[in-house]
Amino acid sequence: MSILNLKSIAINKGIKFINERRGWTTDRKIIVIESDDWGSIRMPNRYTYENLLRKGIHVDKSVYNKYDTLASVDDLGHLFEVLSQFKDKNNNSPVITANTIVANPDFKEIRKSNFQEYHYEFFTETLKRYPHCSFKMWEEGINNKLFYPQFHGREHLNVNRWMYFLQCNEEVRSLFDMEVFGINGNRIGNKTYPSFVPALEVDAHTTIEDTNSVLKEGLSIFKNIFKYSSYSFIAPNYIWAKENEDLLNNEGVKIIQGVFHQKCPIRGKKFHYLGEKNEYNQIYTIRNIIFEPSDFIKKDWVSSCLKEIDRSFRLKKPAVICSHRVNFIGGIFEENRTKNLELFKSLLFSILKKWPDVEFMTTEQLGKLINSSIKNTIVK
């Protein structure tokens, strides 16, 4: 590793060390569970996964290609069963802030246009095409206060970039034929392609204006589906621009979820801290706990998370747990869901045992609590 890279890592760690001590504090022991990618397609099924392997495309190297797909009735049922077993001091169960992608490519209509026009369908329509999926299970989770959708994007896809390569590249189109667009390492055959999943990344094909248009339309779809506006937003791959924040604010988004650093198109990296306000008076919340057992199966995730939670409480910060949808999915490999839910259950049990006064909240509830308790000042 070069001296320049080592210096960059040291600077990033230093800024994170400072920022995790800045901003909003509380004596309350608050747990928020943020989970991304709900509603978005990834690997359609086991057959497609094995077919891609036979073609020499190493989808087994990425947990999102190997395990992730739309949540089935069984996936949601098992998740809700675990959540409902636990209660905090206010008699509330843990609740998943389910950051949701509201639309997916309409492969049939795109093909009909000879790849000249992009078309999408609401994710609720996609669910109808996938076996064993049902939006009724989403509604059940919402009604039982176990599952609370927030906005993650229209698609988890850089539409213009993808359409450009579909029009001129047979290898990318071969994935299209299997209704796949996200591949680990972006390597297909002997070629490497730019990633198609960072929806708000700007390049020669996608402008800031394009990303704002997608966000505005996505937020409208979100309200159409769920009958309420999203109070918060998390950008796919943590990539978004300052101009996106302006649009989001105008559309009613008051909380921006994220980690300590933001990947800004054009401008580069920007760091944030909990309770920081931008010029639009929006508040940043920060994920400070990682629970991603699908990623590293040999790691002791329960012990690791408990240490991170203990650290956050000692710093008088809420514990905001990041755990992507992939950790709860068993449609391609059932054992992925089974083992991870056991770990998740153990984590929740250990949390309540160690901190019986813990409070489970959604991102929206945390954001409103922060908003009500800090001065109405703007931090630029």
Image (cartoon, rainbow, N blue to C red):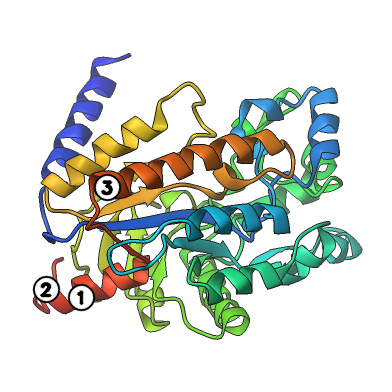
Give the side of residue 234 with respect to residue 81, left or right: left
CA distance for labels 1 and 3: 19 Å
Label 3 Cα crowd, 10 Å radius (few <14 / some 14-19 / many 20+): many
Camera-side residue: 281 or 293?
293
Quadrant for residue 39, please give it.
bottom right
Are the residues at dot 1 and dot 2 in contact (C-beta closer than 8 Å)?
A: yes
Labelled disc at residue 260: 3
Q: Which residue is drawn at 45% across and 58% down?
A: 235
Could you say where residue 112 lies in the image, as x and y percent from the top left? 91, 64
Task: Answer whether residue 268 is visible to the viewer in this image.
Answer: no
Label 1 sits on what residue type?
Asn
Check disc 2 and report its element: helix, strand or loop.
loop
Q: Is residue 185 above or below residue 221?
A: above
Nearer to us: label 3 or label 2:
2
Q: Which residue is drawn at 61% across and 84% down?
A: 224
Camera-side residue: 137 or 254?
137
Residue, disc 1: 371
Labelled disc at residue 68: none
Label 2 sits on what residue type?
Ile
Check disc 3 and report its element: helix, strand or loop.
loop
Residue, disc 2: 374
Nearer to us: label 1 or label 3:
1
Quadrant that contains the N terminus: top left
Could you say where residue 142 lies in the image, as x and y percent from the top left? 54, 73
